[in-house]
Amino acid sequence: MAKTKTIYSCTNCGSGFPKWAGQCGECGEWNTLVEQVKQGTSVAARHAGLTPDSSVTVLKDVDLQQVQRISTHSPELDRVLGGGVVPGSVTLLGGDPGIGKSTLLTQYMAKINASHSVLYTSGEESAQQIAIRAKRLGEETQSLKVMAENRLEPILQAAQRERPKVLVVDSIQTVYTDAIESAPGNVTQVRECAARLVRYAKQNECAVMLVGHVTKEGSLAGPRILEHMVDAVLYFEGDTSSTFRLIRAIKNRFGAVNEVGVFAMMETGLMDVSNPSAMFVSRFSTESAGSVVLATQEGSRPLLVEVQALVDQSAHGNPRRLCVGLEQNRLAMLLAILHRHGGLMLSDQDVFANVVGGIKVTETASDVAVLIALVSSLLNRPIGSKLAAFGEVGLTGEIRPVQSGLERIKEAQKLGFASVLLPKANVPKKTVSDIKLVPVGHIQQVLDYLQSN
Ligand code: TYD
Ligand code: MG
C-alpha cells in the first residue's frame, strides 16, 4: 500500500509545502495554498515509459523519419502549428470563455477526420450541445466521434479502443482521475491528468489537443507546469464582441513561436482571413485626428493595424493614462519623451491609446505610430495622406530601427499606402517603387513632418 501524507500545494505555481501558510513561499501569491493528499508513488514510477527507447545514441545515427504532419486544411491554423498537427504531440489551446475554442476544434478536427480519425471528448458539454454547435458548422462535422466524459480513465480506454490519430480533450480543467482525491481543476488533478495524456500521446503516436481555461489575469489556469509539459501552447486572442480572432503560438517545439493565425467568427463558424491587413484597416478614416496605421510584424507576417489615441483636457488633478492592446509602460515613456525631447506637455491631459480590432501589439516598433496618433489628437490634425508608420523611440528621442523593415514597407505598398514613415536605419538599399519613404532619425523630425503635412 502506497504511503499517503498531506501536503499543501499552491494553486498558482504548483509548489508543495509541508505546512499551510497564507502566502506561497515560491511565487509569493496570497491564499493559494490548498490541502492535498499526496500519493506515495514516486515521480520516476509515474513517468516511466515516456519514451519507448531509453538507449544512448549519437545524433547523426538518429533515424530522421520525415514527420508526417496532418494538415488541418486551414492555412491559418497550419501556420500557427508550424505546418500541421504532429503525430504524438500535445498542444494546449488557451483562451477566454466563449472566444471559440470548442468551435475551432470541432470545425478543424472534423476536416482532419475525413482522412485521419479524431475522437472529441468533452467534459464541459453534453453530446447534444456538441451536436447543436456542429450542425451550425456544416455537414462534414457530422461524422466526428464525440464523447461527453470528464473522467480520465474512460477517456483513455475509449482512445485505446478507437485508436484515433487525434484526441481532443475539452477541457483539461474539467477532467479528473480517481487516483487523486482533489477536485477537478485542482493543480494536482490538472497536472496528473495532463501527465497521463502526454504519456498516452507519446506512446501511441496520437496527437492530443487540450483545451485550457484562462484566469482573470489572462494566463492559463492551473500550474505553469502545464505549459512545460506540452509541446505547443496556443492562445486564442481577440475581443468576443468583435469578429476577429487571433491564434498565437506562445511555445512550439515543432515550429516558430509568435506566429499568428487570423480568423473571423461568422454565423457558420470560423473563417480563415488570408489578407488580415486589408480587414484591419478597411474602415480607416483619414479625416479624423488621432488615428494612424501601424505596420507591425506578427511572427513571420507583417500586419497593418490602426492605432488610435485620444488626448483630452483632464478634469481631475491626476490625469488618466489608459492603453488597450498596447503596453501601458511604453505609453508613459512616450509621454515623457514627447515632453522632454519634443517640447509637448501632456501632464494635464487624459491620454487614451487603443489598437482597433482587439489586437494586442507588444513590439516596440509601435512607438512611432502611437506617438503620431498622440500628437495628431493633441493638435487636432488628421494624418491626411495615406500614411503607415513604424519604429522604436529611444529615451534620448532617437528613432531606432526595428526588424523586418522591408516586409513592413512591402505590406503597406501592397495595400496602396502612399507613404511610410520609418526609422532612418530601416531604409532599404534598393529603392521600393510606388511608395514614398519618410525616414526619420529623431522625434523632432516626426513632429516636423506632422506640422508640414
Ligand atoms: P465556443 O466555441 O463555445 O467557445 P469556448 O469553447 O472558447 O468557450 O464559442 C462560442 C462563441 O462563438 C459563442 O458565443 C457563439 C459564437 N459562435 C458563432 O458566432 N458562430 C458559430 O458558428 C458558432 C458555433 C459559435
Ligand atoms: Mg468550450
Image (cartoon, grey):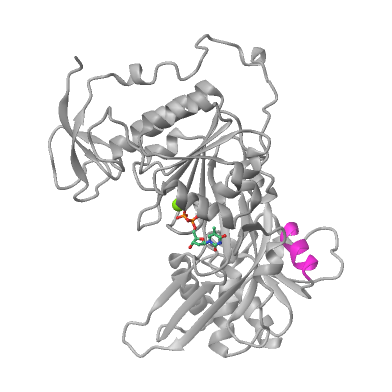
Give residue 350's position: percent from left, percent from top: 42, 83
Closer to the camera, 239 or 406? 239
Q: Does residue 80 appear anywhere in the picture?
A: no
Q: Can residue 316 be seen in this snapshot? A: yes
Q: Quadrant of the C terminus?
A: bottom right
Relative to 314, say whether 228 is above or below. Answer: above
Residue drawn at the location 28% of the way across and 41% of the way down: 186
Q: Is 419 situated above or below 1?
A: below
Residue at (67% x, 27% y) in the render: 67
Residue 365 vs residue 405: left or right?
A: left
Residue 155 magenta-highlighted:
no
Q: Residue at x 55, y 64 (%)?
A: 359
Q: Which residues fall within the magenta stretch?
A: 406-415
Query: Residue furthest toward the top?
Result: 55
Q: Is residue 396 above or below residue 224?
A: below
Q: Is residue 408 magenta?
A: yes
Quarter that holds the N terminus:
top left
Question: Is residue 334 depicted above or below 131 in this figure?
Answer: below
Q: Quadrant of residue 276?
A: bottom right
Which residue is at 22% across, 47% downward? Answer: 32
Residue 402 picture location, percent across and down: 64, 58
Q: Is residue 210 left or right of residue 421?
A: left
Q: Position of residue 234 (x, y in %)?
A: 52, 46
In the rendered picture of this protein, how many numbered marks are placed on residues? 0
The picture places residue 301, in percent across and down from the top left corner, at 68, 54
Main secondary structure of the magenta stretch = helix
The image quarter containing residue 303 is bottom right
